[in-house]
Image: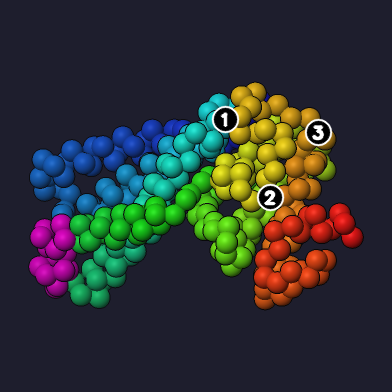
Amino acid sequence: MLSVTEIIVLAYKVPTFIVYSTLTVRLAIQLYQGSKRHSPEFYPFILIDGVVANSYFIFETCLLMLPRWGMLTDFFKSNERTARLGYMICTLFEMSCFTIALNRCIAIQKPHAYSTRVFSLKGVKIIILVMISISFGFGIGLACFESAYLTSDEMNKLFIAICFLTISSIAAESDSCIICHEVISTAQTKFGNGEPESSLLTDLTSLCYSFGGQVGCTNQFNCHNRKDKQFTSQDIILCIQLVRAHIDSLYSQFEAGFSACEFCGKNNYCTQYDTCIDDN
């Protein structure tokens, strides 16, 4: 069921997307045909900006809006590799905005050099090639790390998280736990507000799949082998408690600078933290 806010957003987003995408395609055709009405000094950057903006709308719809309405709900679990594409799209968006601003600045400050030297047809091609190269180079670099989708219903946003997960390194795990902590906090808030269990599972399953079930997950409910993914309220509460305890233990160990475990006295990272708590 769509909320009133979502209906209002769709009422202007869908028509805007249709008009914007149509104009973008038309501009691409005009530039390809060499239309004199569209100068090569400026309009190619507008074309790139339009392609990026329309791509963002498609990604937002498929990855964030549809799952909230009960469609493509398993996308986060089965297509986490596609999260790496987001780095390239986001970087290309920033690069296109910067280039358009630079284009306007040079047009005002250096009008004589605008079309003859800086933004000549050859110069525009080089600039666009550099933009795409930097964007994809940045994205490919980040793609070397594990990536996953995380959602925040409170902010109505989709996040692409880079998972620097190394079990033997407390410093690397502390970075992962920052993201981990946010997901659990969101789940706890939603549970306390009486949210349906299905919305809680979106966060918890995203958490499990984001970190491969290795961060604070005991696989007590056989989550990774179950097809139905149906858990009770008690399952959810216990799962939150287990992961939260593991996160707190990592934070305390990291802040203590690899000091000895306060319960068993072991040096460095104590892998039996939960057991130590029970024994004491």
The percent position of residue 26, horizontal first and vertical second, equals 24, 37
Quadrant showing the C terminus: bottom right
Which quarter of the rendering shows the N terminus?
top right
Badge 3 element: helix
Does residue 199 show up?
A: no
10 Å neighbourhood of mark 1: few (<14), some, or many (≥20)? some
- Which stretch appears magenta? 112-126
Which of the numbered marks, if any, corresponds to residue 233? 3
Return the residue nearer the eye: 67 or 247. Answer: 247
Give the number of the disc on residue 118: none
Residue at horizontal 76%, vertical 38%?
A: 236
Q: Which residue is mark 2?
A: 216
3 or 2: tag closer to the N-terminus: 2
Are the residues flagged by discs 3 and 2 in contact, CB closer than 8 Å? no
Q: Which numbered disc covers residue 73?
A: 1
Q: Is residue 116 magenta?
A: yes
**Magenta stretch prevailing secondary structure:** helix
| Residue ranking furthest to the right | 280
Residue at point 43%, 42% (across, down): 81
Mark 3 surroundings within 10 Å by alpha-carbon count, few (fewer than 14), some (14 through 19), many (20 or more): few
Q: Earlier in the sequence, mark 1 or mark 3?
A: 1
The answer to whether residue 171 is seen in the rendering is yes
Q: Nearer the viewer, residue 148 or 104?
A: 148
- Mark 2 or mark 1, which has the lower sequence index? 1
